[in-house]
Image (cartoon, coloured by chain):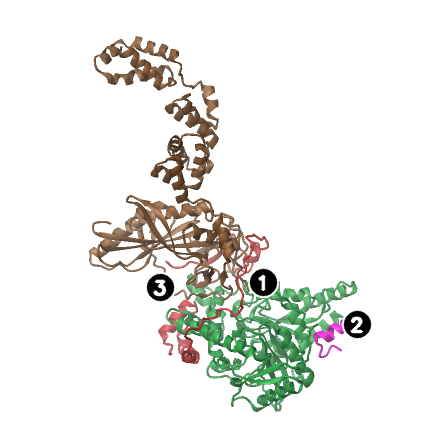
Amino acid sequence: MEFDRETLLKLGKLARISIKDKQLDFLSRDLSSILKFVDQLKEINTENIDPTANSLNQNLIRREDEKSNTNNIEDVLENAPEKELNFYVVPKVIE
Amino acid sequence: MIDKLNIVKAAELLKKKEVSSVQIVKEYLNRINKGKDLNCFNEVSSTNAVKDAEASDERRKNDSLKSEYDGIPIGIKDLFCTKGVTTTASSKILSNFVPSYESTVTQNCEDAGLISLGKLNCDEFAMGSTNKTSFFGPVKNPWKSRGSNAELVPGGSSGGSAAAVAADLCTASLGTDTGGSIRQPASFTGTVGLKPSYGRVSRWGIVAFASSLDQAGPITKTVDDAAILLEIISGHDKNDSTSSIHNKEEYFKNLNSNVKGMKIGIPKEFRSDNLPSSTQKAWDDCRNLLKSNGAEIVDLSLPYTMDALPAYYIIAPAEASSNLARYDGVRYGLREQGSNLIEMYENTRSEGFGDEVKRRILVGTYVLSSGYYDAYYLKAQKVRSLIKNDFNNAFSKVDAILTPSTPSVAFEIANEPNDPVQNYLNDVFTVPVNLAGIPAISIPFTNDENNLPIGLQIITNSFEEQKLLNIAKNIEETIQYKEVPEKWWVK
Amino acid sequence: MIDGWNLVIGIEVHAQVNSSSKLFSASSTKFGSSPNSQVSLIDAAMPGMLPVINDYCVKQAVKSGIGLNAKINKKSIFDRKNYFYQDLPQGYQISQYKNPIVGEGYIDIESKEGSKRIGIERLHLEQDAGKSLHDQDPKYTFVDLNRSGIALMEIVSKPDMNSPEEAVDYVRKVRSILRYLDTCDGNMEQGSLRADVNVSVNKAGDELGTRCEIKNLNSFKHISLAITYETKRQIKLIESGKIVDQETRLYDINTGETRSMRSKEDAHDYRYFPDPDLLPLVLEDQWIEEIRNNIPELPDQKKERFIKEYSLSNYDAEVIVSDKATSEYYEAVVKGRTPKLVATWVTGELFSVLNKKNISIQDSPVSTDMMGELLDNIKTGKISNRLAKDIFEDMCETGKNPNSIIEEKGLAQISDEGEIEKLVDEVLKNNPENIEKYRNGKIKLLGFFVGEVMKLSKGKANPATLNKLLKKKLDY
């Protein structure tokens, strides 16, 4: 599986990581190598096998509908790079 | 007296009042300072550690100890969120992040009175097996090859945690293991590294890499210490939906090194011509040792275990690509400027993440994307079922499985593979364990012809950590591994 | 059907679950609090945070599923829907993709042709996103995460609706059921209930056309207008030889038009995968049964009962049961009284006042007791129906009960024949020409005499008695 420029740039967009032109080549090479490595799995017969998403053999535990007041605005805003009037502030999306 | 301390010895000394917690802590801080060259620590808690030690000594005076391990200093991998102390995941994107909360694991340690000496360097976001991907630079293995001055990798991702213990910069440390990140560096540094069963230890407050694989665990000098730390950090956490309701156990108290009648499996798929002969010999010697001690050796086949590595390098990056989406510069961490939101995201993440992290995010994004999900992600999850099945079958025949921990000993930091997959091969023996969610331990068995540590891995079924520790203790008692590296880093 | 064109509509309703805390975190769900005051570490997606599911939200979803006559799936999975947006802190939404908690169901709506069954595809639980304020600053967006993480039920219909009216009726019915169950307050202005509408057109006989999705409609009026506009737009495109692009559109309430959402680059690839932080949700049979046994009477059952018990017309019953509070009000008043009379007054005078004041029946200025008292006075003949309307207005303004008002204003109807006769005699005495005209054939003048006596009696004369006496005296 070869990673062409277009695929790479599309992936970058999806992952919100910009890839500079000069990086494209060796990134493409690296990722192609990784993909070639994982492609081995194609050889394995997995017909009628159920996938495992989590190895823990347990069902989801549900909690009571209770509000806790342990978190306040300082905790969630103190590390914000930009904030105003208790809002997080970000540059606009271009419409 | 404070030389080569481990948790058990330190507890004894403190109890007999032959030494105070402040003395121990100050000595370690001194060593850490002298050992800066190793680059084990991202942050040293010089002031807080002494304060905590003073408080511990006070509690000892008033007979109000938190536990018998009150006052003993350990190191914490910089992946655990520690309240008021910078937590970076060894990444530029979190280099200024100070959490207002404490992870469950480190809180458990605090509740037992353990003292943090600081945050240990690791591969960025726990992605790597060399500790070279850290934003804060590589960690150097305290071990050097005989007759060579070349700096070696300590392994990863918990490289700092393992190196610090091996260099005696702390009594023990905490790491995390997603594909071998505790066991592989333990093997490279001659220390004991334990990955508990998935769900045994809470993940709350640990920077997530691959949610269905991550587990926190101890890196120590002895099996006793590993049992003690495991006891302290394990247990159900209602804040973690993947935390097992399995009861807590008294691993240290119940340690029993008798292996008579136990069946030890030797899986043929782990054998290879590429294995260094000294590693093969260590594996054989250990097998014989266990046999002499009364265990029965059983030949096994785990047919799908060699498929674990490619499956892992689909599943782990997939989960990581999603777990790392929150690092976007909006609410915390690095933010780079951008004229609009998308530009801000792209600049922040491109600048904030290192190359290996970016590679894995891109691979993860790819294997989940429309058109590729079935062929890659779903396929890998099915192979995962096959691997789990292999182990289930094996454990119906044996109590434990013995393998080498790593396919080689520590190699040079300067060694730059020309393709990322070469580094991934370091995890070939450790990764199947994470996929199956079962526990495993790496213990130092012997050093090779170049005086570099060789670790062996013992694996048991889920929630059989007691058995695991017992077998490890048996080996440890028999071989009495006493090697320590020469202190070349002390300035 | 419009001139040979078929209209096919499918609707996704997003209903905020009525619960104290959020779906996966313990923050409050209260509406309208100050920015970021109801945001926990989990909601803010801080490093190392993990979701823990709220049992009550699960219960509410199951309740809703039962109310929608749907299959409850004992095992369901939570998946991550991955995309980047400033009010989506995790960079993914926890939702359900292939294995939702509720499967296929249906509801019945009343259409002109009678009852029509609208199929429901599924109902699943997911997290709501935060709020972005774009108009606080020309260059920046302000983000409030209070809403982030609140539980939403996404209810997906089958494409069974064929007109704007049916679409509105469907949403009305779903809203009504959820309100009956108390699983969602259905407050569309506050955004607790919103609809995404999928519209496509095709010529009768042809296969289905390309559908467009119109997002975030939050009033019945907008749903109707948006569908109407979109239908016309698509028909116009096709008739002029163009193709309808499959796209997501927004309804502009100012222009009345739908427009394409330009900010979407390539189609989103959400890369759904099972959330590894959450294990499978497995519901116990007994737990589900207990919920089923405690489901209150729902609109359809209530309507059937009202028609049977109170002999109400289909229309009246439909109107009264559409809102649970209204049906409860009705039943409180109708005890021991004439059902039709009560129905007329509740859906007539009372609704009129509520609409004018823009309040709900829970805030009615007239309590059920007072309403009952008023109707009793009509029944006994103490006041006329017409007078009752005036008294009702008074009750709404002053909050006084009808008996007091009748007492104070001396409004009790005059039923005494003698008294009425006196008034009749006076009117007749003063209008001899009209008596002549009446006797000569202008029988319509009866109304005139009635009016005059009423004026004299200040509206209090008992109409039946008055009529009898007048006729007696005029038709000799």
**Alpha carbon of mark 1 to alpha carbon of mark 2: how far?**
37 Å
Chain A tint as drawn: red
Q: Which mark is residue C267?
A: 3
Q: Chain of mark 3?
A: C
Looking at the picture, do discs 3 and 2 lie on one chain? no
Q: Amino acid at mark 2?
A: Lys
Looking at the picture, do discs 1 and 3 lie on one chain? no
Which residue lies under the disc numbered 1?
B99
| On screen, residue C236 above or below A38 | above
Observer able to see residue C145: no
Q: Secondary structure at mark 2?
A: loop
Kindly report which numbered mark, 1 or 2, lies closer to the viewer in this rendering. Answer: 2
> Is label 1 in contact with label 2 (beta carbons under 8 Å)?
no
Which residue lies under the disc numbered 2?
B16
> In the rendering, at what x and y percent does residue C109 appear?
34, 46
Q: Which residues are magenta?
A: B1-15
> In the rendering, at what x and y percent does residue B400 appear?
59, 79
Chain B tint as drawn: green
Chain C tint as drawn: brown
